């Protein structure tokens, strides 16, 4: 197993990816204000992201690696709707509510959602049942989000 297949690498990569979310929220929220349109800022974000994704697809040779042997349910393509909702919401709310507050609430929603998805193994996710330890961790996360966004 090479370094790119190690759990530590995955954890670090996803931590760096997570660090980009508030940066994206701040940049896109600012763009939405300057353009006076969160919707237009979201469209621009997706155009830039689409161009970069297409470039990566072609540079990685990803098109030649598409052996589709079974039909794919339509629901598998709906992830983009959640991304659009997230970006539009963040672009509109973050400048009004604060990037930190918005991200903290997103984090809370992600933790609740991931717990349900993992517990039931929804959408072919690895099943990871809820334990007392996990419930305690969730409670600490809720407390952490509350303490983070609370104005003293």
Image (cartoon, rainbow, N blue to C red):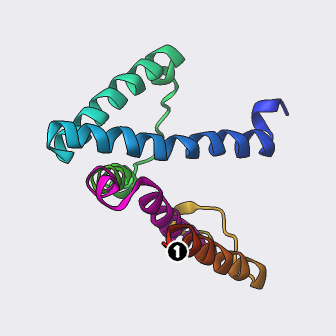
In the figure, is residue 41 to the left or right of 16? left
Relative to residue 143, is residue 99 depicted above or below?
A: above
Circle 1 residue: 152
Please tell me which residue lies in front, 47 or 71. 47
Residue 129 pos. (x, y %) = 69, 77
Q: What residue is rendered at 65% in x and 81% in y?
A: 139
Please identify the quarter of the rendering in which residue 51 is found. top left
Q: Furthest-front residue in view?
A: 152
Which region shows up in magenta? 90-117
Q: Quadrant of the N terminus?
A: top right
Q: What residue is rendered at 57% in x and 41% in y?
A: 17
Q: Does the magenta stretch include residue 24?
A: no
- Which type of secondary structure does the marked residue at label 1 adopt? loop
Q: Furthest-top residue in view?
A: 59
Please tell me which residue lies in front, 89 or 120. 89
Q: Is residue 110 magenta?
A: yes
Please tell me which residue lies in front, 8 or 75. 8
């Amino acid at each position: 197993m090479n370094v790119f297949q190690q759990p530590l690498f995955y954890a670090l990569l996803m931590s760096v990816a997570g660090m980009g979310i508030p940066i994206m929220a701040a940049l896109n929220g600012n763009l939405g204000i300057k353009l006076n349109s969160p919707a237009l800022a979201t469209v621009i974000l997706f155009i830039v992201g689409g161009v970069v994704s297409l470039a990566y697809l072609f540079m990685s040779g990803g098109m030649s690696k598409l052996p589709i042997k079974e039909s794919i349910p339509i629901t598998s393509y709906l992830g983009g709707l959640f991304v659009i909702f997230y970006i539009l919401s963040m672009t509109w709310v973050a400048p009004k509510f604060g990037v930190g507050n918005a991200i903290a609430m997103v984090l809370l929603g992600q933790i609740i959602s991931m717990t349900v998805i993992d517990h039931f193994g929804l959408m072919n996710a690895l099943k990871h049942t809820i334990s007392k330890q996990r419930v305690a961790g969730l409670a600490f996360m809720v407390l952490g989000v509350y303490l983070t966004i609370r104005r003293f």
